[in-house]
Structure formats: structure tokens, C-alpha cells
Image (cartoon, rainbow, N blue to C red):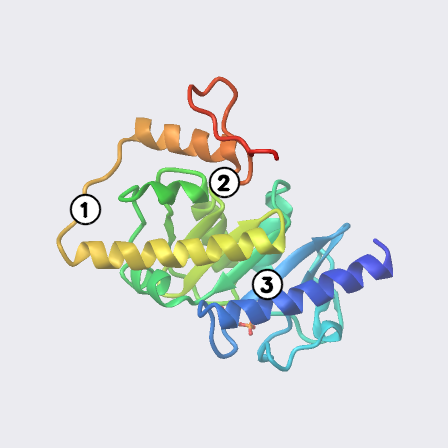
Amino acid sequence: MSDNTTEALREEMVAICRKMNSSGINQGTAGNLSVRAGDRFLITPSSLPYDLMQPEDIVEMDFDGTYVGRRPSSEWRFHRDILKMRSDMNVVLHCHSLYATTLACHHRTIPSFHYMTGVAGGTTIRCARYATFGTQALSDAALEALEGRKACLLGQHGQISLGKTMEAALWLAIEVETLSRMYVQALTLGEPPILSDDEMARVIGQMERMSYGQAPDAEGANDVARPRHG
Ligand code: 13P
């Protein structure tokens, strides 16, 4: 990967980390971000506030755990393992957003109480079992919870969202936080009803077909939205 491409990725990482803070899903030195870069990956350094972080502070790591630069995020193991196992994804974003973490403190899986649960790729957003931060055990638990999914909660810890791009991973992390907030609020009236697996299969199919709002309606739909010219 050329130096120019790596430099552009580092700059985008700093911008995305600052958006994590300004969107309210992160605070202090919690949270971390990694991006695939050729046969290596780039990851945020440990314990450096994002408003101070500069592109040159981003750490370049090999999949064997060796690195160049500052000390990498304490969570480099789950970043490394997810990027290794999930060739469909290029970005791993972790944060301690408030409502997702509230559910994770109770080891709650988010069910299909709302159709948007499907944005993570399945009928639930699972909560991984608790393991100490920075350990291989946490990485193993996260990988299990992410099977067939693009997001999960981490028991008594926070959330992980994946993406092909940094913007997509950030978007998903904000969606997971919004859904978590809705679920916590819905629970105040009792356990809400759950959409059926058949309906969720339709929802996920529809999301894939429409790239969720970024692609035109399916061919053959009886009422097709199209741009007006002139
Ligand atoms: P780092 O600063 O080492 O990335 O740790 C923050 C964190 O969220 C640990 O889970």
C-alpha cells in the first residue's frame, strides 16, 4: 500500500474518531478504531484523547501483533482477529456508548423489537459474554457474538460495529446506540413484542436491495419512485 494511501487513511481515522466524540457515542479515552491497510492494519493508539491525536499517532500493526509507532490500543487483539476472520469487513469501531452499554451491563441481546435491528445483518444484536478488556478471551467472545452480524454488544463493557468503510462503521455504531436507547425506553412499558423471523428476513432483504436508501426501488415494484427531469 502506497504512503499516500496510508496517509489518507490516517487522516480519515482522526476525522472519524473526532466524529465519534461529537456524535456523543464516545467520551474520554474510551473507544478505538482500526482499518485494514493492505496486508497490515492501522489502529488508534492506547489512551490518547482524540482531540489531541494526529495522523502520525496512528499505529501500523502486522497480523502477528508486531507494530511500528506508539503503543496500540489495548484492544488490538479483537481488532486483529475480526479483520483476520471477516474478509467482508475493513473497519472495526469500538465505543462505550451510553445506552448500548446500559443493555450490555444487563447482558441483554437486542431482539427484533424494531425492524432496524436488521441493520446489523440478523434478527438480533447479540451481547458477548464478559471478559477482561484487552484479553484474548474478550476477542474470542466478540468473534462469537459477531458471527453473521456486523455489530454486537460486549457484556459489561460497550459495543463493536463493523463496516466496509469508516463512515459505514460509524453510521452503524450510531444506529446501534439509537436502537439501544429505543429498547431501553420500550422496556419501561414491559418487554415489547418481537417481529417474526419471516418479517425480519423480508426487512433484511429489503435493506440489502435498497442499500438502505442509497439505491433505487427494486425493478418490478408496482409503484416505483424515480427522479423527475426538467
Ligand atoms: P485504549 O485507549 O487502549 O484503546 O482502550 C480504550 C477501551 O475502550 C478499552 O476497551
- Up the image or down, 194 lies above or below 157; here it is above
Q: Residues within 10 Å of mark 3 (few under 14, many from 20)?
A: many
Regarding residue 6, the answer to whether it shows in the image is yes
Do callouts 3 and 2 mark residues in contact (Cβ within 8 Å)? no
Do callouts 2 and 1 mark residues in contact (Cβ within 8 Å)? no
In the image as oriented, which residue stretches furthest toward the bottom? Answer: 52
Q: Nearer the viewer, residue 100 or 119?
A: 119
Residue picked out by circle 1: 192
Q: Residues within 10 Å of mark 2 (few under 14, many from 20)?
A: few
> Which type of secondary structure does the marked residue at label 2 adopt?
loop
Closer to viewer: mark 2 or mark 1: 2
Residue picked out by circle 2: 213
Sooner in the amino-acid sequence: mark 1 or mark 3:
3
Name the amino acid type tagged 1. Pro
- Up the image or down, 40 lies above or below 132; here it is above
Question: Residue 115, percent across and down?
Answer: 33, 40
Question: Residue 124, percent across and down?
Answer: 35, 42
Sooner in the amino-acid sequence: mark 3 or mark 2:
3
Name the amino acid type tagged 3. Leu
Q: Nearer the viewer, residue 79 or 173?
A: 173
The tag on residue 33 is 3
